[in-house]
Image (cartoon, rainbow, N blue to C red):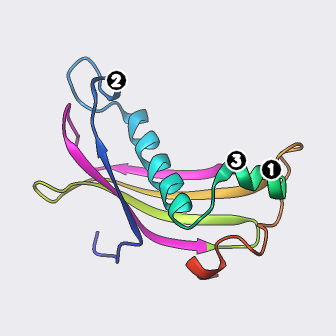
Amino acid sequence: MSAAVVFSWPVRVYWEDTDAGGVVYHAAYLRFLERARTEWLRACGVEQARVREQHGVLFVVADLSVKFHLPARLDDALRVDITAFTRRSASMRFAQCILRPGDGALLVEAAVRAACVDAVSYKPRRIPDTLLMEHVRA
C-alpha cells in the first residue's frame, strides 16, 4: 500500500490469535484492525465510553471488506496502519492495512465503515460536530 499513513499501531501475534498450525486465524485480523481504530480515536482525544456518556452515541462497524494477502504467524511483530479516513454525517470510513515491518510484507488490506448510532435505540445518528473535526476531511 503506498498511501500516506494516518496512524500506526503495533501488534504482536500471540498463541490465542492463531489456529492449530500457528497461523493467525482470520477473525484475529479484525481484532487487530479494531484496536488500531480505537487507539487512533484515543490519540485524537476521543474515548468511546465518554462519547457514549456525553453524546449518547456509539460507533459500530456497518460495512467491512477484507483482502488477505499473506499469513502472519505466532510471535510476529505487526503494524496496523490507517491509511485514509473520511467523516460523513453519520459514518466514518477507514482504509487500513496490516504489515509485517521486518520484511515489509503487506498481509491484509481492509475497508471499514463505522456508523454512528444512538446508544439506546441503535438507530443511525449524526456524528456530533465536536468530534474529530480537526482530524478529518469530509
- Quarter holding the N terminus is bottom left
**17 versus 104 height, above or below:** above
Identify which residue, 33 or 49, lies in the foreground: 49
**133 versus 77 height, above or below:** below
Residue 22 coordinates in the image, percent (x, y): 21, 25
**Contact, CB < 8 Å: mark 3 with mark 1?**
yes
From this viewpoint, which residue is outermost toward the left? Answer: 103
Q: Amino acid at mark 2?
A: Glu
Q: Residue at x 89, y 44 (%)?
A: 121
Q: Amino acid at mark 3?
A: Ala
Mark 3 residue crowding within 10 angstroms, few (<14) / some (14–19) / many (20+): few
Q: Horizontal placement of 17 versus 43: left or right?
A: left
**34 versus 15 height, above or below:** below
Q: Residue at x 83, y 60 (%)?
A: 125
**Label for residue 16?**
2
Q: Horizontal placement of 28 versus 111: left or right?
A: left
